[in-house]
Each structure stands twice: as structure tokens, then as C-alpha cells.
Amino acid sequence: MSQSKNRYQAERWLLTAEEDLRAAQVLFESNIYAQACFLAQQSGEKAVKALWYACDLDPRGHSIQRLLADFPRRAELSDAETWLELGALLDKFYIPTRYPNGLPDLTPGQVYGRDDAQRGLNAAGDLLSRCRSWLETHCAV
């Protein structure tokens, strides 16, 4: 794929990540925290996948931490450990925020609260910003 097509695909993924983050914020403001956490995770996952698509690569899986650890151009991520920490935090919101059988005797809405959602929103926003910056620096068209 050409560099311009790669960048186009990356932009599509990044825009969708931004939409997910906005939706997470709306849920947060409506006190729907478990779902806000999940959409924060989705935002982070899509933002990181944008990096892969920009490099004409096919990302596999849903773990943000794994996607970052396996990113072939990881050496170009400034402060890669922070990226991994953000991914690890968001990965915790992938399954148990959606399914009651991921938690013992409780529902996601009973477990995930305001502080969890705020941490998720902050992490997703930070990761999204880092991905946008990386794309602007390494994949200028």
C-alpha cells in the first residue's frame, strides 16, 4: 500500500478512537462508568492500531500493551515504558467492564466507579495524543 493510503487508513482509525473517547466522556458525565471504561479501552486500542496501519502492518488482538510491545517501530516511541503502562491500565477494562461473569457475584456497574472511569479517560486521552503526535512526526504526508 502507498504511504498516502497507509496514512489515510491510520487517520480513519485515529478518528474513530477520538469518537470513542468522546462517547466515553458522555457516559462518564452520565455516571455510566463501566461502559465509559470500556470505551476508553476501545479508544486506546484503535489509536494504537492506527500506528500499525500507518506502517502497512496488520495488527492482531485487543491487548493494547501487547500491540505496543510488539510494534515493530517501538524504538521510535519516546518513553515506551509510559506507553506500555497506559496500555496495561486500559487492558484491565476490556472484558470485566462488559460481562457480569468476568466478576464474582457483581455486575460491571457495581464494580467500576467514577475514579476508574476518570483514570481510563485520562489514559486513553494521553495515549491518543501520543499516537497522533507519533503519526505527525513519523508519517507526514
Image: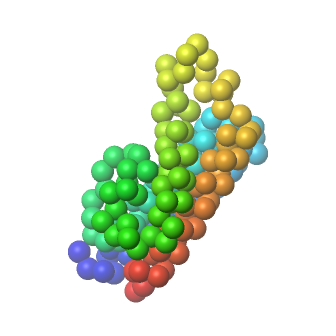
At a point 45% along the width and 75% down the height, the residue shown is: 135
**Depth check, front residue: 53 or 79:** 79
Side (left or right) of 101 relative to 7: right
Where does residue 137 sit, x and y in percent of width and height? 47, 82
At a point 61% along the width and 38% down the height, the residue shown is: 35
At a point 55% along the width and 63% down the height, the residue shown is: 128
Side (left or right) of 90 relative to 55: right
On the question of residue 65 being in view, the answer is yes
At a point 66% along the width and 32% down the height, the residue shown is: 112
Q: Is residue 135 above or below residue 81?
A: below
Residue 123: quadrant of the picture: bottom right
Q: Quadrant of the C terminus?
A: bottom left
Q: Is residue 64 above or below residue 71?
A: above
On the question of residue 19 being in view, the answer is no
Q: Quadrant of the N terminus?
A: bottom left
**Depth check, front residue: 63 or 83:** 83
Residue 30: quadrant of the picture: top right
Where does residue 104 sit, x and y in percent of width and height? 55, 16
Outermost residue, bottom side: 141
Side (left or right) of 61 relative to 96: left
Q: Is residue 24 above or below residue 98?
A: below
Where does residue 62 sit, x and y in percent of width and height? 39, 46
Outermost residue, top side: 105
Where does residue 46 sit, x and y in percent of width and height? 45, 56
Residue 4: quadrant of the picture: bottom left
